[in-house]
Image (cartoon, rainbow, N blue to C red):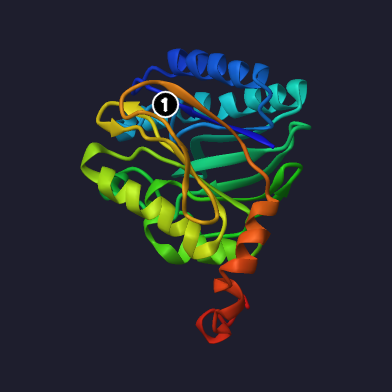
């Protein structure tokens, strides 16, 4: 399977420009044979927004997901697309998993909000349930969610093979990004894909980590890039034969899952 992670420079509030830029890179990844394509957190709206701007951009952000559904169906690819969601009066940082037939398999809402996000968005209900797609069983988190190790562990215990983490990680947080993504992968013997943005203080370094915790590929800190990698999910089960963390895990630690 070939995966593509698009490291974008989004301009906060410029949703049409961001959309066209994102779509250009999606089409490039499709031409390169990608089966699974992932975008960063809040890529279409940008991250540094006021409450008023988020309210204004919510509908066009969600409408872009519908365009992505059509794109997934037309080209037969799985897309993981972050957006701004709204339920009644509550706003959420969200991500949609779109199957290659255009169907939305799952919408996940960010559960752990960072800093000023709490003044605009509501936390999700922590629905840590992976989704079976045509390319494998995918678990999704968003940025700060990943910094709590329990989230990745629960997704793994529920069968996730790839944990995808659209993010806006800053230069100030870069060291944690470099440490935590490999730790989450090796602790759970899964693939972890952290998809970051660049510009507006983001540190880039979108990266794919294999089930042994080794870096497969990493983008630069400053440039718009596409990470393109082939992965074999059998590597997960081969690794678990040598590193039996999950077999040796005490079920008393996770009584409702194991």
Q: Residue furthest left?
A: 172
User: How many residues crowd mark 1 within 10 Å: few (<14), some (14–19), many (20+)?
Assistant: many
Is residue 159 shown above or below 117?
Answer: below
Residue 107, x across and y down, in percent: 60, 45
Residue 210, x across and y down, in percent: 53, 49
- Which quarter of the rendered picture does the N terminus lie within? top right
Q: Residue at x 48, y 15 (%)?
A: 21
Secondary structure beneath label 1:
loop
Q: Residue at x 44, y 18 (%)?
A: 18
Residue 52: image quadrant is: top left
Q: Is residue 190 left or right of residue 132?
A: left
Q: Residue at x 65, y 53 (%)?
A: 235
Q: In terms of depth relative to the viewer, which is nearer, 257 or 195?
A: 195
Q: Residue furthest front?
A: 242
| Number of numbered discs | 1
Is residue 218 shown above or below 175?
Answer: above
Residue 140, x across and y down, in percent: 55, 49
Examine the rendering and report whether any part of residue 38 can be seen: yes
Q: Residue furthest bottom?
A: 252
Residue 65: image quadrant is: top right
Is residue 258 shown above or below 139?
Answer: below
- Which quarter of the rendered picture does the C terminus lie within? bottom right
Q: In terms of depth relative to the viewer, which is nearer, 190 or 37?
A: 190
Examine the rendering and report whether any part of residue 123 can be seen: no
Residue 84, x across and y down, in percent: 47, 36
Residue 228: image quadrant is: top right
The residue labelled by disc 1 is: 45
């Amino acid at each position: 399977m070939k995966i593509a992670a698009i490291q974008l420079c989004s301009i906060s509030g410029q949703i049409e420009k961001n959309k066209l830029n994102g779509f250009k890179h999606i089409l490039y990844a499709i031409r390169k044979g990608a089966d699974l394509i992932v975008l960063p957190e809040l890529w279409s709206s940008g991250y540094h927004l006021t409450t008023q701007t988020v309210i204004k951009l919510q509908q066009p952000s969600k409408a872009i997901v519908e365009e992505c559904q059509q794109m997934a169906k037309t080209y037969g690819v799985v897309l993981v697309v972050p957006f701004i969601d709204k339920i009644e009066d509550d706003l959420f940082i969200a991500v949609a998993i779109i199957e290659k037939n255009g169907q939305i398999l799952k919408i996940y809402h960010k559960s752990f909000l960072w800093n000023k996000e709490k003044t605009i968005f509501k936390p999700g209900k922590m629905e840590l349930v992976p989704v079976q797609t045509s390319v494998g069983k995918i678990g999704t988190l968003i940025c700060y969610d990943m910094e709590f190790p329990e989230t990745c562990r629960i997704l793994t215990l529920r069968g996730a093979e790839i944990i995808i983490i659209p993010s806006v990680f800053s230069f100030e947080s870069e060291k944690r990004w470099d440490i935590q993504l490999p730790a989450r992968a090796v602790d759970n013997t899964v693939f972890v894909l952290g998809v970051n943005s660049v510009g507006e203080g983001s540190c880039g370094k979108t990266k794919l980590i294999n089930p042994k915790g080794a870096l497969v590929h990493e983008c630069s800190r400053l440039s718009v890039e596409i990470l393109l990698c082939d992965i074999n999910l059998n590597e997960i089960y081969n690794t678990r034969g040598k590193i039996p963390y999950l077999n040796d895990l005490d079920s008393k630690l996770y009584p409702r899952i194991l």
